[in-house]
Amino acid sequence: MPGKTLVLAEHRAGKIKSISWEAIGFGQKLAERLNQELKVVLIGKAIGDLAEEVSRRCGQEVLTLVNDHCETYTPEAYCHILSQVAQQETPFLFLMGHTYQAIDFAPKLATRLGRGFIPNCVDCQIDADRVVFVRQVFNGKINLQVGLKGEPPYFVSLQQGAFNAYEVQSRQSPRVVNLTIPLPDEVLKRKVLEIFQAAQGKVDLSQAEIIIAGGRGLGSKEKFQLILDLAEALGAAVGASRPVTDGGWLPKEHQIGSSGQTVTPKLYIACGISGAIQHLVGMMNSSCIVAINKDPNAPIFSVADYGIVGDVFKVLPVLIELAKEIRK
Amino acid sequence: MKILVCLKQVPEKDSRYKIDDLATWIREDDLVFETNESDVYALEEALRLKEKLGGEVGVLSLGEERALKTIKSGLAMGADRAFHLSDPAFQGSDAFVVATAIARAISGQNFDIIFTGVQSEDMAFAQTGTILAQLLGWPHATIVMEVNVSEGGKKARVKRELESNLFEVVEISLPAVLTIQSGINQPRYATLKGIMQAKKKEIRRFSAQDLGLESSQLGKTGSMVDHQKMFFPEKKKKTVILEGTPEEAARTLMERLRKEAKVL
């Protein structure tokens, strides 16, 4: 399959996101298998140095789209630029990390070009004349095999952590080519007024050695007390999945996952957490993971070292008593 | 302010699944269905805007007969009227086909804002709302955590959730599509009065033919991506499942954490 693979690399504060390196690494592997050329695409204002660094590190050509209006991301500008890039470069695949930014613009871009977008893929099978992707459906409990349809380019985003086995390989000296694509007024109507970090509060879970985390399975704010009790008995920090902070059982700053904190404790005990991918990406690199859940098919068990399939309300009180004994 | 909220009916969160014989869908016989979580937050946000600014809230669901339960619960929460897009030919459609059908159904209805949830818990495309915006030629904002309508209903100022605890505030012109993130508010429960009133509210039904959609534009054929088969994932990590009563399992766990993993 001759042709070209493009990878859009996302960056913030002068650094390429790790998920974009994963996409570049996988893109290299795929391009090699399909005998295709790979190019990395970067959009932004002052990105010359960053582009050289990317090209040096992966040994591929980097296409830069330098534009004063692109210091801050907007879906209109990105779609305008990337649809022209797609038309000029005629790639086979257009890859990116499955980030909040990809969620925001990729469906619009693909639709604008009359194409589909396969989001959040966790696996890919490459044969001589066929590429199929795998994505998770039904809250991570079922996988769906998705094939490419119609004419290229095919737009695909990759789940964080799913393709990190592909190392970025360097072969050559840097090559950076800038494309100038002017932005018409009609794509500049959106006003980005502010980007800010939510107040960090008092809870920094990144340094915690032990985290006891609770999820929807705890059922209510009152019953969530069991998590606090076990944490206290073990001298551990308290974490939560999204439904807990959405429901106001705990302040937002305890949330672990893609929109909250990323943690890597020695021990992570997940209680009543089913393990949506948004939660898993925030804790899957913990050294030892324990999952307690009544559903044996809950995706949390796919990352756990130890699992108890059972009722958290029966298991937690015993753990609390045992933890108190240990601490004595 | 005329607001439309798209609601999707999905299996309950704790469902245990079986895959059907063709491996293209799940077996639905033993499942219980509910309204997709972030869609409920979207409806609550729409109702709050209506209470503040006046106007009306419509709800729309695409799905078979069982989706009526989701539509009726939306009407019971306080929506004024409903659209039910139902046709066997919709089976197997991707987000593009669904968005196309929605765009057709609401043509000429002059909505100011369309709300959807960020993503569905079953297929998790996270793109129906964004595609809909593109088809309508409207701006959109995804993963929205706060909505303020300004300039007499001409603009919306919205707070979007980004990754790693970052937020963005953007101003876009209306009409627009906003995809709402769970946690933006605390959704209300339907009252008995609401449930009674819902029975009198209008539900307009649309078949594929009513929407002027032909079979080539629907289902698997009309989809932009090729959904081939479903299968259960293989476990990547070897999980030691601790058996026994809760008491025994808890004791074994503590023992293993101390002596084997050495983390306690």
Image (spheres, coloured by chain):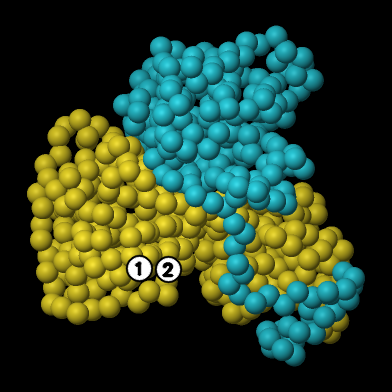
Chain colours: A yellow, B cyan
Decide: marks 2, 1 in contact (CB < 8 A)? Answer: yes
Disc 2: which chain? A
Q: Residue at x 74, y 62 (%)?
A: A296
* Residue indicated by mark 1: A26
- Relative depth, front residue between A158 and B248: A158
In the image, is A148 to the left or to the right of B67? Answer: left
What type is the residue that disc 2 sits on?
Answer: Phe
Q: Which type of secondary structure does the marked residue at label 1 adopt?
A: helix
Disc 1: which chain? A
In the image, is B214 to the left or to the right of B36? Answer: left
Indicate the position of residue B140 as horizontal and vertical percent values.
Answer: 38, 34
Indicate the position of residue A236 as horizontal and vertical percent values.
Answer: 68, 73
Q: Quadrant of residue B158?
A: top left
Label at residue A163: 2
Q: Is B7 situated above or below B264?
A: above
Indicate the position of residue A48 as horizontal and vertical percent values.
Answer: 14, 63
Residue sitting at the far bottom: B259
- Relative depth, front residue between A37 and B113: A37
In the image, is A293 to the left or to the right of B99? Answer: right
Q: Which type of secondary structure does the marked residue at label 2 adopt?
A: loop
Q: Residue at x 82, y 80 (%)?
A: B252
Q: Residue at x 52, y 46 (%)?
A: B124
Badge 2: few (under 14), some or many (20 or more) residues near its Cα, within 10 Å? many
Q: Residue at x 42, y 64 (%)?
A: A125
Could you tell me if residue A160 is visible in this image? no
Ranked by sequence position, the earlier of labels 2 and 1 is 1
Tell me the quarter of the image containing the N terminus of chain A.
Answer: bottom left
- Relative depth, front residue between B263 and B127: B127
